[in-house]
Image: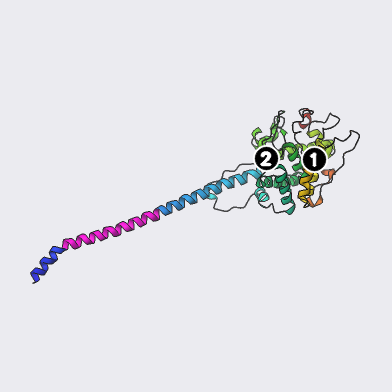
Amino acid sequence: MTNAANFALQAVRPALIAGATFFSDIGAGVLSTARLVVTLAGCLALLAGGALISSEGARALLMARLPGGEAEVVDAQQVDQPEEPRADARVLANVGDPQQKRIVQYLSRRYRVADEAVRMLVSNAFQIGKEKNLDPLLILSVVAIESSLNPFAQSAMGAQGLMQVMTHVHAQRFEAHGGETAALDPIANMKVGSSILHELISRGGSVERGLQLYVGAGNLPDDGGYGVRVLGERTRLQLAASGKVEAAIASGRAAVAAPAAVPAPDRKPEILPVNAELNGPTDATLAHPSSNSNGDARLPVRPEQSV
């Protein structure tokens, strides 16, 4: 009996071993498959994380570039490590002022430009105005009249950018911003243009005379209505800032339908003081940049811009 049992055991032993091996292989296969799934999931997660990091890195580079005008090299691996934001980046990020929001709304609708782009221009206009003791609304008015908020605007006379600066005349001013190609950089153009108008207003003794010099009409009886258009736009910006955005937009449309009249040579232009609520200086201390005449063929190639 014992021999029979041993014989039977020996007979089925290979089958038992084969079965155990079979199930062991199945278990190993399941485990291997599970590991593969987990590995693939991890890879997908890493890829997704890498995409997010790359996306955020690109966004960080863009946001850092726009407000400051100076490109920064940012390692994507460092993006997830928060650092103290730059001052100019904080300006862009903290556009929570109700007046600035209304100005953005007006300009965005008036000139059909994306809110985010206008927000950047407005925040930097206020920052530049603070640095140079300039009326930010006047800066924005010049930008609006000169280029309709188009940073790539160029005239046949060689004026470029938001404030239509004569790049070949002011090449040295752009060196600090990376060279003449920076003329099409929104912030660099606004900074250089603001410096130019600051000097011209100081030389001319008034905002109106500074605008006339800026547009290159210093030796002409009048500026072809340029100053009236700029100051009219400033009035609309102030109206929008006070909460009357719709009225400002309607006024802008009416101004397009009926161009501003050129004041008589013997008539002293009306002085528009800066709104104190916007922390702007008075007319006696204003120094604001004016740029291009939007291709007015009546005007020369802005010799007075060569200050």
Q: CA distance from mark 1 to mark 2?
A: 26 Å
Residue that label 2 marks: 186
Magenta residues span 13-39
Based on the picture, tell me whether residue 51 belongs to the magenta stretch.
no
Q: For numbered disc 1, what is the local secondary structure?
A: helix
Residue 18 shown left or right of residue 288 in the figure: left
Residue at the location (79% across, 37% down)? 199
Q: Using the image as rendered, state which of residue 28 and residue 131 is in the foreground.
A: 28
Q: Residues within 10 Å of mark 2 (few under 14, many from 20)?
A: many
Q: Is residue 96 above or below residue 137?
A: below
Nearer to us of marks 1 and 2 is: 1
Residue 53 shown left or right of residue 218 in the figure: left
| Residue 151 place in picture, x, y as percent | 67, 38
Q: Kindly identify which numbered label has been placed on residue 255.
A: 1
Q: Is residue 49 above or below residue 16?
A: above
Residue at the location (77% across, 32% down)? 305
| Residue 215 place in picture, x, y as percent | 78, 33
Q: Label 2 is placed on what type of residue?
A: Pro
Res 217 quadrant in image: top right
| Residue 163 place in picture, x, y as percent | 72, 37
